[in-house]
Image (cartoon, rainbow, N blue to C red):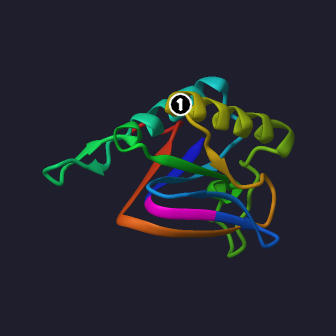
Amino acid sequence: MRAVIQRVVAASCQVDENITGSIDNGFLVLLGIEDADTAADLVWLAQKIAAMRVFGDENGLMNKALADIDGNILLVSQFTLFAATKKGNRPGFTRAARPEKAIPLYESMVKELSRLLGKAVQTGIFGADMKISLVNDGPVTIIIDTKNKE
Protein backbone atom coordinates (compact mmCIF):
# COMPACT_ATOMS: atom_id res chain seq x y z
CA MET A 1 0.00 0.00 0.00
CA ARG A 2 1.04 3.53 -0.65
CA ALA A 3 -0.35 6.53 1.12
CA VAL A 4 0.15 10.20 0.39
CA ILE A 5 -0.70 11.99 3.62
CA GLN A 6 -1.34 15.70 3.46
CA ARG A 7 -1.84 17.80 6.57
CA VAL A 8 -4.80 20.04 5.82
CA VAL A 9 -6.90 22.75 7.41
CA ALA A 10 -9.77 21.68 5.12
CA ALA A 11 -10.43 19.04 2.48
CA SER A 12 -13.45 17.70 0.63
CA CYS A 13 -14.37 15.20 -2.05
CA GLN A 14 -17.06 15.81 -4.63
CA VAL A 15 -18.65 13.26 -6.98
CA ASP A 16 -21.25 14.43 -9.51
CA GLU A 17 -21.63 17.75 -7.69
CA ASN A 18 -22.33 15.99 -4.36
CA ILE A 19 -19.93 16.24 -1.41
CA THR A 20 -19.10 12.68 -0.30
CA GLY A 21 -16.70 13.64 2.47
CA SER A 22 -15.45 16.81 4.09
CA ILE A 23 -13.10 17.60 6.98
CA ASP A 24 -11.50 20.49 8.79
CA ASN A 25 -8.08 20.03 10.47
CA GLY A 26 -6.53 16.65 9.84
CA PHE A 27 -5.25 14.48 7.03
CA LEU A 28 -6.24 14.02 3.43
CA VAL A 29 -4.99 10.49 2.73
CA LEU A 30 -4.69 9.27 -0.85
CA LEU A 31 -4.47 5.47 -0.70
CA GLY A 32 -3.14 3.16 -3.39
CA ILE A 33 -3.57 -0.61 -3.08
CA GLU A 34 -1.56 -3.19 -5.02
CA ASP A 35 -2.05 -6.91 -5.56
CA ALA A 36 0.67 -7.85 -3.05
CA ASP A 37 -1.02 -5.98 -0.18
CA THR A 38 -2.28 -7.88 2.86
CA ALA A 39 -4.26 -7.24 6.01
CA ALA A 40 -0.92 -6.87 7.83
CA ASP A 41 0.04 -4.00 5.50
CA LEU A 42 -3.30 -2.37 6.22
CA VAL A 43 -2.96 -2.58 10.02
CA TRP A 44 0.64 -1.31 9.97
CA LEU A 45 -0.24 1.64 7.72
CA ALA A 46 -3.39 2.56 9.66
CA GLN A 47 -1.42 2.65 12.91
CA LYS A 48 1.27 4.83 11.30
CA ILE A 49 -1.30 7.28 9.97
CA ALA A 50 -3.25 7.51 13.22
CA ALA A 51 -0.14 7.99 15.37
CA MET A 52 1.82 10.30 13.05
CA ARG A 53 2.92 13.37 14.99
CA VAL A 54 3.03 16.24 12.50
CA PHE A 55 0.77 18.80 14.17
CA GLY A 56 2.25 21.73 16.05
CA ASP A 57 2.50 21.85 19.82
CA GLU A 58 2.63 24.97 22.00
CA ASN A 59 6.25 25.51 20.88
CA GLY A 60 5.46 25.12 17.20
CA LEU A 61 7.16 21.71 17.01
CA MET A 62 5.54 18.79 15.19
CA ASN A 63 4.73 16.72 18.28
CA LYS A 64 0.98 16.16 18.13
CA ALA A 65 -1.01 13.39 16.46
CA LEU A 66 -4.57 13.47 15.12
CA ALA A 67 -6.05 12.45 18.49
CA ASP A 68 -4.23 15.30 20.23
CA ILE A 69 -5.88 17.92 18.02
CA ASP A 70 -9.23 16.12 17.55
CA GLY A 71 -8.26 15.83 13.87
CA ASN A 72 -10.10 14.06 11.09
CA ILE A 73 -9.28 11.98 8.03
CA LEU A 74 -10.60 12.17 4.49
CA LEU A 75 -9.57 8.87 2.83
CA VAL A 76 -9.58 8.69 -0.97
CA SER A 77 -8.69 5.64 -3.06
CA GLN A 78 -6.14 6.37 -5.78
CA PHE A 79 -4.88 3.54 -7.98
CA THR A 80 -2.65 5.98 -9.87
CA LEU A 81 -0.19 5.90 -6.95
CA PHE A 82 1.05 2.67 -8.56
CA ALA A 83 1.71 4.20 -11.98
CA ALA A 84 4.61 2.65 -13.88
CA THR A 85 6.39 5.39 -15.81
CA LYS A 86 9.65 3.74 -16.89
CA LYS A 87 8.67 3.14 -20.51
CA GLY A 88 6.95 5.63 -22.77
CA ASN A 89 4.78 8.55 -21.79
CA ARG A 90 1.57 6.75 -20.94
CA PRO A 91 1.65 5.33 -17.40
CA GLY A 92 0.74 1.71 -16.81
CA PHE A 93 -1.24 0.61 -13.78
CA THR A 94 -0.76 -3.15 -13.72
CA ARG A 95 0.55 -3.11 -10.13
CA ALA A 96 -2.64 -1.55 -8.84
CA ALA A 97 -5.03 -4.10 -7.36
CA ARG A 98 -8.19 -4.90 -9.27
CA PRO A 99 -11.42 -3.71 -7.61
CA GLU A 100 -12.34 -7.18 -6.32
CA LYS A 101 -9.22 -7.09 -4.12
CA ALA A 102 -8.87 -3.34 -3.59
CA ILE A 103 -12.42 -2.53 -2.47
CA PRO A 104 -12.45 -4.87 0.57
CA LEU A 105 -9.00 -3.59 1.64
CA TYR A 106 -10.10 0.03 1.19
CA GLU A 107 -13.26 -0.59 3.23
CA SER A 108 -11.19 -2.32 5.91
CA MET A 109 -8.86 0.69 6.03
CA VAL A 110 -11.85 2.97 6.60
CA LYS A 111 -12.98 0.75 9.50
CA GLU A 112 -9.50 0.43 11.01
CA LEU A 113 -8.78 4.17 10.90
CA SER A 114 -12.24 4.86 12.38
CA ARG A 115 -11.52 2.40 15.18
CA LEU A 116 -8.10 3.92 15.91
CA LEU A 117 -9.45 7.50 15.90
CA GLY A 118 -12.69 6.69 17.70
CA LYS A 119 -14.71 8.53 15.07
CA ALA A 120 -15.94 8.21 11.51
CA VAL A 121 -13.51 8.64 8.64
CA GLN A 122 -14.76 10.68 5.70
CA THR A 123 -14.34 9.12 2.26
CA GLY A 124 -14.53 9.51 -1.45
CA ILE A 125 -16.27 6.89 -3.59
CA PHE A 126 -14.09 4.02 -4.75
CA GLY A 127 -13.62 4.10 -8.53
CA ALA A 128 -15.57 7.30 -9.05
CA ASP A 129 -14.36 10.40 -10.88
CA MET A 130 -13.71 12.55 -7.82
CA LYS A 131 -12.90 16.23 -7.44
CA ILE A 132 -10.70 16.79 -4.40
CA SER A 133 -10.35 20.22 -2.81
CA LEU A 134 -7.87 20.93 -0.06
CA VAL A 135 -6.07 23.63 1.80
CA ASN A 136 -2.68 22.12 2.58
CA ASP A 137 -1.22 23.14 5.93
CA GLY A 138 2.51 23.80 5.97
CA PRO A 139 2.63 22.27 3.46
CA VAL A 140 3.24 18.92 5.10
CA THR A 141 3.06 15.97 2.71
CA ILE A 142 4.37 12.52 3.62
CA ILE A 143 4.51 9.40 1.45
CA ILE A 144 4.47 5.95 3.04
CA ASP A 145 4.92 2.66 1.20
CA THR A 146 4.35 -0.54 3.19
CA LYS A 147 6.80 -2.40 0.96
CA ASN A 148 9.54 0.19 1.59
CA LYS A 149 9.33 1.06 5.27
CA GLU A 150 11.67 3.98 5.87
Residue 35 visible in rendering = no
Residue at which label 1 appears: 118
Identify the residue at image location x=82%, y=45%. 98
Identify the residue at image location x=77%, y=41%. 102
Is residue 10 highlighted in magenta?
A: yes
Q: Residue furthest left?
A: 59
Q: Is residue 4 above or below residue 89?
A: above
Q: Which residues are magenta?
A: 8-12
Q: Where in the figure is residue 84, as x and y percent of width and height?
A: 65, 59
| Residue 38 located left or right of residue 100 | left
Q: Where in the figure is residue 44, as x and y percent of width and height?
A: 51, 28
Q: Residue furthest bottom?
A: 89
* Quadrant occupied by the N terminus: top right
Identify the residue at image location x=62%, y=56%. 81
Q: Quadrant of residue 34?
A: top right
Identify the residue at image location x=82%, y=71%. 16
Q: Main secondary structure of the magenta part?
A: strand
Q: Where in the figure is residue 2, as x and y percent of width and height?
A: 57, 46
Q: Label 1: few (<14), some or many (≥20) within 10 Å?
A: few
Q: Secondary structure at mark 1?
A: loop
| Front residue of this view, candidates 140 and 94 | 140
Residue type beneath disc 1: Gly
Q: Residue furthest top?
A: 40
